[in-house]
Image (spheres, helix red, strand yellow):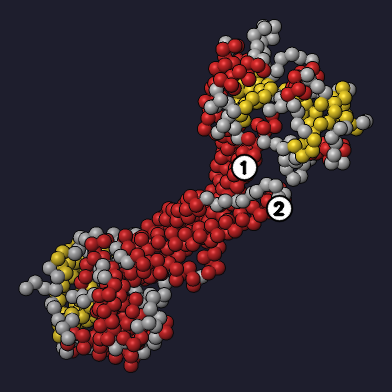
Amino acid sequence: MAHLIELRDVYKIYRMGTETVHALDGVNLTIDEGEFVAIVGQSGSGKSTAMNIIGCLDVPTSGTYHLGGVDVSTMEDDQQAEIRNKMLGFIFQQYNLIPKLNVLENVELPLLYAGIPAGERRRRALRSLERVGLSDKCKNLPSQLSGGQQQRVSIARALAGDPSVILADEPTGALDSRTGREVLAFLRKLNQEGDTVVLITHDNSIAVQAKRIVRLQDGRIIYDGDAGDPRAVVQPVEPGGAPEEDCSFHDREVEV
Amino acid sequence: MNLSQSFRLALKSLATSKMRALLTMLGIIIGVAAVIIITSLGNGMQQMMNNEFEKLGANLIQVQVYGVGMDSRSVDPEDMYALARQYPAYLSGVTPSVSAQAVVRVGSQEYEKTGITGVSEDYINMSGETVAQGRYLRYVDVDRAKNVCVIGAYLSQEAFGGGGVGETITLSGVPYTVVGVLSPLSSQSSQGSSDDRIYIPYTSALRLNNTAMVSGYLFTCPGKDSSATAKAIIENRLYETFQSSDYYFVMTSAEMMDAMNTMMNTMMVVLVAIAAISLLVGGIGIMNIMLVSVTERTREIGIRKSLGAKRANIRTQFIIEAGTTSAIGGVLGILLGVGLAGVTGVLISSLAGPGTTFTAVPAADSVLTAFGVSVGIGVFFGYMPADKAAKLNPIDALRYE
C-alpha cells in the first residue's frame, strides 16, 4: 500500500530581492496512515513551508508530493481547495475560528464547502463537537469561550470533514502550558483512535509527545526517527549565535 | 455552497455595523427614491391631464381652414353639416368655430383676456358644458346673426356679480345682449381661463371679423376609437375641395393627448436618467465598502480557503453580501419614494383645489424595476471586490493580521 504522504525531492525556492532562498532543499519524507509525526525546526528551518506544502496551501517549486496516492504538487487553486476539504484538517496556533459564526457553524464550515446537506452537516458537526466535549457550547460565539475551548472547537472543525490527515501548526503556541498539555493529550488520543496527526512546532518538549520526529534545518531533514531517541531532541546550534525562539510565521517571501 | 448561509452572514455583518451599512446604502436609497418619486408624480400628472382632456372632450376634432387666397375654392358650414350627416357613425356633431378679435367692454371696464368664440347652437352639446342661468344660443340667433352672447362663469362673476342675463356687453363697440351664463368649469376660475369666455353666434363672429369664410370647425366623434377614421373622413372631404393638404389642418384631441403624453414621457426619461446617476454613485459606494470589507476579512477568507472554499464560494459570498446591501437599500428607497410621492400627491391635490384629482401613482413595474436595478447594481459593483477576495492566496490571507 502506498504511503499516505510522500514527498520526493521537494524544493521550494523563494527569491527575496536578489537572493534566492531554499526554504525546502530536497526533502524526502513519507508518512503512513496512523502515524503521529512532529515536524520540528527553528524559525527559518522551512517547517512552515513544509506545512504549507503538506497542507496543499502551496505547491513545490520542484519535486512531487503525493497525498493519498494522488499527485497534488501541480494542482490548481480550486483543485487544491477540494483536496484540503476532503483530505486535510487544519489546527492553527491562533485557532482561526470565524468570530461572527457560532461554534456549530464554525465546525460545519468544511462540510458546507463539501456540499453536504444541512441536516447531515449539523449531525456530523455535533458528533465532532461531542468528541472534543463541547457539544453544549454549540450556540456560543468563539469569543465567549476560553482559549483552550476555542482550540478544541478548531480541532472539532478539523475532524468534522473526516480527513485523512490532521495538520496541527503550533497548536499550543497561544495557550498556557496546562491547556497546551490538554490539547496535546487530545491529539494523542485522536492518534490512538486511528487518526494520522502531523504536528508542526519549534518546541522540543511538545515534539516529544509525538511518536516520530522529523527535524528540519535550513530546508533539509537532519533527523527523522523515533521520538524516544535522544538524538531527536538535540538542539542544533546556528553558526554564530544562540537558537532563536520564534514561533511566528516567517516573513513574507516572494515565490520564484 | 450554501446560499442561505451567505445571505444570513451578509445580514449579520450589516446588522453589526448599522451606521456604515446605512451610509453605504444611502446612494442607492436616494437614487431609488428619486426614480420612484419622479415616475409616480409623472404618472399622476399624466393621469390628471388625461382626466382633464376627457372632461373637455377627448373626442373633439379641430379643423382649421386657411383658405386659398384669391381662389374661390372653399368649404362652407353647409358642406361640413352635410359631411356629418353622411357619416353619423363617425361624426356625431359639428359646429363652425370662429374666434373673433374684438375689444370686450362692460360699461367702461375692458376685459383684455376674454376669449370670444363664434359657434353654432350645437356647440354646447359637443363641449359638455351646461347653462347655469338663462339659455344657450339658438338656431334663430345663428341664422339671423343676432347680437346675443352666452358668457362664462368668470366674466359673470367679475362684471355682473354672478348674474348677467339681460345685461349688455360691447364687442368692438357693438352691443351684445347676454342671454345665458355657463356653469363654471373649474373651481378656481381666473382671467383668461376656460371660464373667461364669450360665445356668440358664428355668423355674428364672421361679421365682427369682417370676413365671410369660416376658418375653423369642431367635430365630435362618438368614441376615441373612431377618431382616426373620423379624421380621415374630414381630411378626404377637405382634400376634395382644395386638392392639396396645405390649406387645412385637422387634429383630434386624442392626437393632442398623445403628443402631450409623449412629451411627458420624454421629460420623465430625462429626469429618471438624472436620478439614475445617484444609483451609479451608490453602486460605487458599495464597491468601495466591499473593498474595505474584503481587506478587513482577509483572515476569514484565508480560513475559509484552508477549509476547502473554492474561488467560486468566496466570490459568491461577497457578491451576495453586496447584493443584499443594495437590495435592502433598494427596499428602503422604495418605501421612502412611495411615501414622499404620496405626500407630494396630497400637497399637489390640495393646491390644485377640489375640482382636480391628483394621485401620485407608483406603478408596480417601476417599483419592481427599481428593486431589480438596485440588486443588479450591488451584484455588478460587488463583483470586482468579490473577485479580489476569491483570488487571495490562502497562505498570505491566513498570515494577514
Assign a secondary structure to mark 2: helix
Displayed quadrant of residue A205: bottom left
Residue A255 % position (x, y): 30, 61
Q: How busy is the neighbourhood of tag 1: few (under 14 within 10 Å), some, or many (20 plus)?
A: some
Visible in this render: residue A188?
yes
> Front-most of A179 and B45?
B45
Residue A190 % position (x, y): 21, 85
> Front-most of A104 and A201?
A104
Image quarter in which the C terminus of chain B is found? bottom left
* x 63%, y 20%: residue: B81
Q: Earlier in the sequence, mark 2 or mark 1?
A: 1
Image quarter in which the N terminus of chain B is found? bottom left
Mark linked to residue B350: 2
Q: Residue furthest front?
A: B140
The answer to whether residue B113 is above or below residue B298 is above
Q: How busy is the neighbourhood of tag 2: few (under 14 within 10 Å), some, or many (20 plus)?
A: some
Displayed quadrant of residue B87: top right
Assign a secondary structure to mark 1: helix
Q: CA distance from mark 2 to mark 1?
A: 17 Å
The answer to whether residue A91 is above or below residue B133 is below
Chain of the residue displaying label 1: B
* x 68%, y 51%: residue: B349
* x 47%, y 59%: residue: B327
Q: Which residue is mark 1?
A: B51
Amino acid type, callout 1 = Asn
Displayed quadrant of residue B26: bottom right
**With B184 as the anchor, is A38 left or right in this view?**
left
The answer to whether residue A77 is above or below residue B77 is below
Visible in this render: residue A90?
no
Residue A206 % position (x, y): 26, 87
Q: Are marks 2 and 1 in contact (CB under 8 Å)?
A: no
